[in-house]
Image (cartoon, helix red, strand yellow):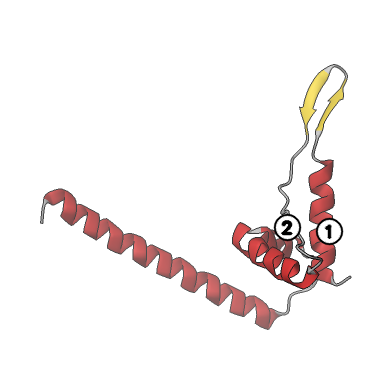
Amino acid sequence: MNSAARSVWNVFKRSSQGVDSVSHGHHHRQEQWRGIRVKVLNGNLESALTFMQRKMQSSGIERMIKHEQTHHIKNSEKRVLARKNLERRIKSQDLARKLKVILSKKVRGL
């Protein structure tokens, strides 16, 4: 089992553990993890795995798993990630600024 599959398995194990528990007469709710369910049609495991990977990417579970990883990240990799985050933030701020200008013109009736 590769590391990505192991991480997914750990997430799914946590999701099955996130049930209501009762202790000392008080209800305590543990944190509940969301899981992804994929149907394997006609025993075609490969297509089910690719479908699951797409669902993981879109749902953000993949990002959560990568965030939980505890292995060492090289400085060069940190610089690349920092630059990508900065570019993403600047792009988002630029888009927000443009939308604000458009909305303010629309409100004024220009």
Kind of residue at disc 1? Trp
Q: Residue 65, position in %: x, y?
A: 73, 61
The residue sitting at the bottom extreme is: 76
- SS at circle 2: loop
The residue sitting at the left extreme is: 110
Q: Residue 104, position in %: x, y?
A: 20, 53
For residue 108, above or below residue 93: above
Q: Earlier in the sequence, mark 2 or mark 1?
A: 1
Seen from the viewer's position, the closer of residues 78 and 61 is 61
Q: Quadrant of the N terminus?
A: bottom right
Count of labels shown?
A: 2
The residue sitting at the front extreme is: 42
The quadrant where residue 59 appears: bottom right
The quadrant where residue 91 appears: bottom left
For label 2, the crowd category at 10 Å Cα-Cα, with few meaning under 14, some 14 to 19 and many 20 or more, is few
For residue 25, above or below residue 86: above
What residue is at 54 percent from the left and 76 percent from the top? 83
Task: Give the residue pinned by disc 1.
Answer: 9
Q: Residue 81, position in %: x, y?
A: 60, 74
Seen from the viewer's position, the closer of residues 13 and 53 is 53
What residue is at 70 percent from the left and 70 percent from the top? 50
Task: Give the residue pinned by disc 2.
Answer: 38
Q: Residue 25, position in %: x, y?
A: 85, 16
Kind of residue at disc 2? Val
- SS at circle 1: helix
